[in-house]
Amino acid sequence: MRCEGTYTPCLLPIEEIIEETRDIKTFRIRRPEDFVYLPGQFAEIFVPGVGEAPFSISSSPTNPTFLEFSIKRIGSVTQALHRLNPGDTIGLRGPYGKGFPLEELLGKNLLFVGGGIGLAPLRSLINYVLSPEHRESFGEVFVLYGARTPGDLVFRWEFPSWEKRKDLTLCLTVDEGDTSWSGRVGLVPNVLQEVFTRSCANWVGIVCGPPIMIKFTIKALREMGFEARRIITTLEMKMKCGLGKCGRCNIGPYYVCQDGPVFSYEMLVTMPEEY
Amino acid sequence: MRLSYEGRLVSYEEFLRWLQASKAFATEIVLSRFNIALPSLPTPKSLLLPQREELYHFLWGKREWKVIPLPPASEKVLLLLAPCEAKAVVHVLDEVFLKNAPPDSSYVVRRENLTLLVVGCTFFEATCFCTRVGGHPLSWEGGNCFALPLPFGVYLEGEGPEGRALEPLEKEELEKLVERLAKEALKPLPEKTPEYLYSAFEREVWEEVAWGCLNCGACTFLCPTCFCFDLALEGKLRGAMVRTWDSCMFPKFTLHASSHNPRANPLQRVRQRVLHKFSYFPLRKGKFGCVGCGRCVLACPVNWDIREAVERVVSCAL
Amino acid sequence: MTLREGARKLLEEKSVQGVLGYKRGSLPFRTRPYLFRNPQEVEELVFTPFCGTNLARYLLRLPGDFGKVAVVAKGCDSRALTVLVREHQLKRENLYILGVHCPGMVDWRKLAQWKDLKESEVAFEEGTILIRGVPHPLSSFLEASCKRCRYRSPLEYDILLGAEASPFPFEDHLAALWRLPKEKRWEFFAQELSRCIRCYACRNACPMCYCKECFAESHKPLFIHPSPTLRDNFVFHLGRAMHLAGRCVECGACERACPLGIPIATLFLAVAEIVREHFAFEAGASVEAPAPFVTYREDDPNAFIL
């Protein structure tokens, strides 16, 4: 997207806000024509008078009209975002980073494993794969998604459209159920080994969630026979510029903002454990 | 780029006249060796990456927000700097802000306006270690011109005032100087230093190495290659996005909003500083991220010495 | 007994886990803090007029279960230890204070004008410093805080070692500043603080700055912007001065640490002077004297206290 000055955001109005959970909202913005991106990339969102922070894009690039960001209320920028209403203005610059390695995923079966807000970047790729123009380029799709409680599951409004499809298996789980919940209860890595019983040949595992969930999910995938290069995850680090210049998001010699945020597990094991 | 011996000789007076005609600055290293009345800079990066820079203004006006990009304030400047400092600009800052796409728009303008006058060194100070990291006291790689103060005048190469050719005796002097420097020069670090250090990431030796460091930012702020910055907003209803130097030594440098901090402990931050310069940057770009100017060694309140740290860890990894 | 002998004995007897002292640095005239863990290392322990770093700072970083540690302490270091014990940052029973008489700390930067000066070319005699055989008055080479030091020998110690140092004149460089009109004083500080790059070396070298999160780096609330404007530099240094009122031990660690040579200790010494004048209190000078800002007395003589 073209703006004057490397770090200057373009101002855009919020079209719609979807309340996902008690602390997560999805912000829908009209997509600028020159905002060309891939699933897995992120952008910097600027809240005037408050600050700027990086967020992964949760909409699919196949959606020509909207950009979506699903944002959890954690710090000052996200708190300010949550106070905004449709029609309010935010600044946007990006897209940044490398997205999912689409070339490598062509023809593969895709196992998505998400935890909490970690489904956001995965959703971008899931909807990309499900779109009519790309569906044939990929094999089966299996989505395992978990959150702490049923109330913490995001994109529940979209699940019916996924569940309807024959070419996608959706499996939901929560750490802790409640009276409204008749689904599965259990931690994602454990549930994964229960529900995904197929041979892992030609499957790629794509994982995103809280660090501890990623760690144990990768362990589970490895035990299930997934090769290191067939496990993909996306990482989070403190970022400012998004362009490999401000120097804080490195893990060893790699900048998460530029070389990532998507990394294969094969790559991850060569990196120092400092994230 | 090394001395060609084909340069020219100008008198000190003529040289000074030329400097005075340009808007010239000099780094403190150069000023301490060369007694010229020029405004001084603590580190050359203060010209290219000012410690405080307003990138854009924002304001709330008539029911909507406005963002006003600010073109960088910049004018043509001649900077006198030591060979190591010139290398910091060409090898590190240019690499990050020009070559690493997209280029940084304000850096581009300031860099274009900057003429680098490299002033050669005729001696090594106790803090100098340029030759350990691939530099040379008489190299002017990436510079626009080169000056070397000699007893009989200023030897010049590249842009600058006209002069006369060197007399044979003067040329001999120059050759002698080159010879002496070659003799005094420290040996380069082992070629595989970046790999050795990387492989020693988890070694216990870091405990010992990091011990005395106070975790202040004196070294990183004065370092000519340290480029890390923060983007921090100023103001509420009107204000600016300000770019300012930041330091990997500071605990909040990597603090996530979730309060997770991958480099929460001082040891990790010291290791980051050493490895960024001597391992991560070289692994990416094929050259050290340290130019051996010795500023950090001199500036450190407790004499924490990065030279010793690198040697200690490399010796462990070998 | 010399300092080395004392330190060695403690380590040999295993009565301490380590001796925090100084060893020679990598540059002439520079020393660095070091934790000596075994008696063989003690050969490297030095105490020279270049051992300005306040070691109390380093005690705060030892792990909680470290056990007993010996620490080399000049007058100002011992004052810092006393304050830190009173503020419950250190346990007195875990400290063994190796008191040393301070000869006055020399500013190594002032020796830079002699090119390639070696340590062997500098000697100290009563009140003078001999540089390449030429005597100069020692006082003009001393650090600002040392010139007006009242307690060169430690006030609190377990053993006092080494020879008593020769006296030098008390020189109050603050007096001249006090005499200036307010605007001139402001101008002085404004000029000096405009150079500050906020590397926080002064704060990190200060034995009294042990806050887990410094107000200067707090994001919520944000007190000062991370970029060094004169205004925010003032807020930072004045904020620190307020935090240090009645706590500053006048060691000059801040000024020594400043990479730009800003005479920052002036500010803190001035605050210490005000506290001395109004509360008859000197931080760390006495183990018992009540600290002014944590003491309430109904009969407080100061009219501004209700």
Image: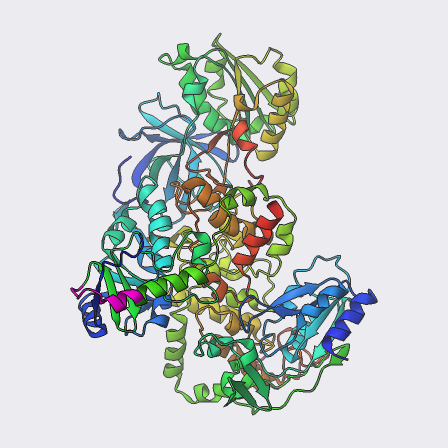
Q: Is residue C201 magenta?
A: no
Q: Residue furthest right?
A: C13
Residue C112 drawn at (x, y percent): 45, 76
Q: Please tell me whether residue B11 is drawn above or below residue A264 in the rendered image.
A: below
Q: Does the magenta stretch include residue B167?
A: yes
In this view, the residue in front, C6 or B62, is: C6
Q: Please tell me whether residue C149 is drawn above or below residue B9 in the rendered image.
A: below
In this view, the residue in front, B316 or A34, is: B316
Q: Is B116 left, or right, of B304 in this rendering? A: left
Residue ID at (50%, 22%): A156
Q: Residue furthest top?
A: A166
Q: Is B290 left, or right, of A274 in this rendering? A: left
Q: What stretch is highlighted in magenta?
A: B161-172
Residue ID at (47%, 79%): C110
Q: Please tell me whether residue A168 is drawn above or below residue C235 in the rendered image.
A: above
Q: Is B298 left, or right, of A217 in this rendering? A: left
The image quadrant where one finds the N terminus of chain C is bottom right
When asked about the image quadrant of residue A173, the answer is top right
Q: Please tell me whether residue C208 is drawn above or below residue C224 in the rendered image.
A: below
Residue B53 drawn at (x, y percent): 33, 56
Q: Is residue C32 visible from the viewing direction of this image?
A: yes
Residue A19 drawn at (x, y percent): 46, 30
Q: Is residue B60 visible from the viewing direction of this image?
A: no
The image quadrant where one finds the C terminus of chain C is bottom right
Residue C129 drawn at (x, y percent): 54, 86
